[in-house]
């Protein structure tokens, strides 16, 4: 079993920056990829950024050039740097671990990011 613990988030003015982190523990050797998703009120959860065990990254078009996903040296921690934040980035941000085809994916508890205009 894998557990994900998120930290960071908070309230920031438009144009500001925030950092999120997610630490994985447990059976981390089975993790194929990690990433961040977000869900705004009344909207579906959407992918923000992902990073594979090999280091390949993928971003939603809406955050390209503003957000950066990275991993720690131990590869059990993933970070999301959020720059040039916009009010439409306001959402609960969830850390996600892709456990491959034979195991259930794991989600963090979520952390609130609020961007004021």
Image (cartoon, rainbow, N blue to C red):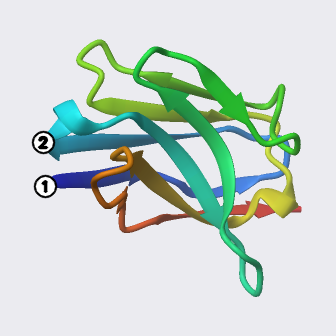
Q: Is residue 18 found left or right of 29 in the rendered image? A: right
Question: Disc 1 designates what residue?
Answer: 1
Position of the N terminus by quadrant: bottom left
Residue 104: x and y in percent read: 31, 61
Residue 81, quarter of the rendered image: top right
Q: Residue at x 85, y 52 (%)?
A: 86
Image quadrant occupied by the C terminus: bottom right
Nearer-N-terminus badge (1/2): 1
Residue 106, percent across and down? 33, 59
* Residue at 78 percent of width and 42 percent of height: 60
Give the side of residue 53 with respect to residue 28, left or right: right
Q: CA distance from mark 1 to mark 2?
A: 5 Å
Determine the residue positioned at 77% across, 57% down: 89
Foreground residue among 54 and 46 = 54
Placement of 117 over or under 30, stated as above or below: below
Q: Which residue is mark 2?
A: 27
The answer to which of 115 and 110 lies nearer the viewer is 110
Residue 41, compared with residue 107, is above or below; it is below
Horizontal and vertical percent for residue 69? 57, 28
Instruction: From the top left corner, tell me how far across and down residue 88 is, in percent.
Output: 85, 62
**Pointer 1 and pointer 2: residues touching (CB < 8 Å)?**
yes
Judge whether 97 appears above or below 34 on screen. below
- Total labels drawn: 2
The picture quadrant where one finds residue 37 is bottom right
């Amino acid at each position: 079993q894998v557990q994900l613990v998120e930290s960071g988030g908070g309230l920031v003015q438009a144009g500001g920056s925030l950092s999120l982190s997610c630490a994985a523990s447990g059976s981390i050797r089975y993790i194929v990829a990690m990433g961040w998703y977000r869900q705004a009120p009344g909207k579906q959860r959407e992918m923000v950024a992902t990073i594979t065990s090999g280091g390949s990254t993928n971003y939603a078009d809406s955050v390209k050039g503003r957000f950066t996903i990275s991993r720690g040296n131990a590869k059990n921690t993933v970070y999301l740097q959020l720059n040039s934040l916009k009010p439409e980035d306001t959402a609960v941000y969830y850390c996600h671990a892709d456990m491959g085809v034979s195991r259930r994916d794991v989600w963090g508890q979520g952390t609130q990011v609020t961007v004021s205009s």
